[in-house]
Image (cartoon, grey):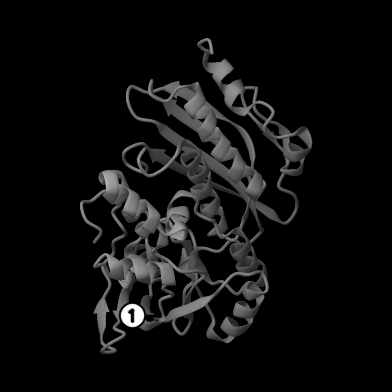
Amino acid sequence: MPPLDEFGRIRFWTEGRQSVDFLARAGVSLGIGDDAAVLKDAGPGWEWLVAADTMVEQVHFLDETMGEADVGYKALASNVSDIAAMGGEPKCALVSVCVPPAWNEERMRRLYDGLYECAERYGVAVIGGDTTSAPRDLVVSVTVIGTAQAGKAIRRSGARPGQAVFLTGPTGLSAAGLHALRRIAAAEGAERDRLLRALPPRLAQAHRRPVPSVKAGRILAETGWGTSLNDVSDGVASEAWEIAEASGVKLVLKEKLLPLSGELSAYAGDNGMSAAELALFGGEDYVLLGTADKSCVRELRERLGAEGIPLFAIGEVEEGGPGVWLESADTGKRKPLPKRGYNHFREGIM
């Protein structure tokens, strides 16, 4: 392939990906190709939501753990998850990339394959962005625009004493998947083959292709049952602290109620790790952590269950200075839960 200029690259990566009809359904009057995209009004009774996130090679992803398409998929998925955490629906995305020499047109084309796969799955119109060169590492920055019903976007600040704390799925899977993938990358020969055969597919998939909880967020917003909400991008402990501080309350999480998947528990046990610590401090699971009145929990569980979405009550909100506590499964005693998430690139797992 002959060298392409900036606009030739953009066309190669994006042209023909989304039809005019698809863009129109997303409220786009004019997409990629001009100085700015043109969006239709959100409509009476609706508000715009805007979220942005950046992924940097060697900081947020590694060649040995993620393929090019995985990087593109995850770059968009993390932003879709931010819209979901407000109870909104994603509509459009702007994608900016800083491309180093090692990422040629074909590698970037595969990155966009993954990005557009995520876009199609969640109905997101890719409407523009920016492209520049970079000296060494790839940078992918995505801005997602979504909508929420006026006054119904769920904030972190709505938790109140007496309410339940919930999760919409198990956590820790992505962190365990990353640990497994890095072990495989560091191994050689027969040991590498053994680790590849033992790799739990669900854990690898959780890290490479996370699933934003858009439907759960919409239900929580439409019913009004979600009083506060956060997506688990940095870990349950970190997200719980954000809700506690924004709401001015104390969150008490119960270790015995944490949803630990069978794959996570087995992997942690086989590798001398704590499944509970992975669940509390592992990030990038993108399930939702939130609060709701206890009187709504049963009906909320049934409503989400009808859509194939689990709901786990894992604690409660109490009066007190902002903080997060963990109630031991063994002793019932409480201890402060550190305000930290999973550090993906520290030696060791915890």
Can you say whether 270 is above or below 94 in the image? below
From this viewpoint, is residue 261 visible?
A: no
Q: Amino acid at mark 1?
A: Gly
Pointer 1 local density, CA inside 10 Å: few below 14, some 14–19, many at least 20 = few
Q: Is residue 308 visible?
A: yes
Q: Is residue 247 left or right of residue 321?
A: right
| Residue that protrudes farthest toward the left in the picture | 347
Image quarter where the C terminus lies is bottom left
Q: Residue at x 36, y 71 (%)?
A: 265
The image position of residue 188, as x and y in percent, is 26, 44
Q: Image quarter for residue 173? A: bottom left
Q: Is residue 7 left or right of residue 278?
A: right
In this picture, residue 303 sits left or right of residue 348: right
Q: 113 and 292: which one is in front?
A: 113
Q: Point out residue 312 in the picture as x, y percentages from the top left corner.
A: 50, 77
Q: Percent x, y for residue 203?
A: 43, 59
Q: Position of residue 143 (x, y in %)?
A: 53, 40
Q: Residue at x 40, y 57 (%)?
A: 174
Q: Is residue 44 left or right of residue 245?
A: right
Q: Secondary structure at mark 1?
A: loop
Residue that numbered label 1 is attached to: 320
View extreme (top): residue: 2
Vertical comparison of 130 with 335: above or below: above
The mark total stands at 1
Outermost residue, right side: 21
Foreground of the two, 81 or 308: 308
Residue name at image x 59 percent, y 22 percent: 12
- Which image quadrant for residue 249? bottom left
Taking depth in this image into account, of 244 and 129 the one nearest to the observer is 129
* Quadrant of the image containing the N terminus: top right
Which residue is most to the front?
Answer: 190
